[in-house]
Amino acid sequence: MKIALGADHGGFELKEKIKSHLLEKGYEVLDLGTNSTASVDYPKFGHAVVNKDADYGIVVCGTGIGISIAANKVPGVRAALCTNTTMARLTREHNDANVLAMGGRIVGDVLALEMVDIFLSTKFEGGRHTNRINSIETI
């Protein structure tokens, strides 16, 4: 499975930890930047992570808010800003989210890696949720 990563300067350090974690677990990683803590504009990286070459995306900025908004501007993307493991699980089960967004200044490293693992291992439940996802797609 290939995971695309994107972050601004506020999410760079957490992105790097997520990248190492994913590589250790055997995932293929597509790192789309940024590559330092130098100030950059998060929309570029929220938009870039949505790549047809990846199965899922993970985006990180300072709070996770701005970069999730940017990612959600791309048709077909369902980016979910998560701050705990329950949100990471439910957004996959109920919303079929394909991009996980987090705040590098909001969640700690251990929690972030737990959320990544849960997000990537949880399946979409389908059923009644499918109609809702289809409704979102028509907006």
Image: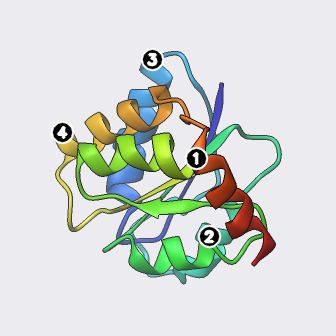
Q: CA distance from mark 4 to mark 3?
A: 15 Å
Tag 1: amino acid: Arg
Q: Position of residue 103 (x, y in %)?
A: 31, 65
Which of the two discs, 3 and 2, sits closer to the camera? 2
In the image shown, does 74 or 128 lie closer to the viewer? 128
User: Is there a contact, CB below 8 Å, between mark 1 and mark 4?
Assistant: no
Picture residue at 43% right of the left edge, 18% below the top: 24
Packing grade of label 3 (10 A; few <14, some 14-19, many >=20) is few
Pick whichever of labels 4 and 3 is earlier in the sequence: 3
Q: CA distance from mark 1 to mark 4?
A: 33 Å
Q: Which residue is mark 1?
A: 128
| Residue 25: assigned label | 3
Which of the two discs, 3 and 1, sits closer to the camera? 1
Pick whichever of labels 4 and 2 is earlier in the sequence: 2
Pick whichever of labels 3 and 2 is earlier in the sequence: 3
Tell me the quarter of the picture where residue 86 sits: top left
Q: Which residue is mark 2?
A: 71
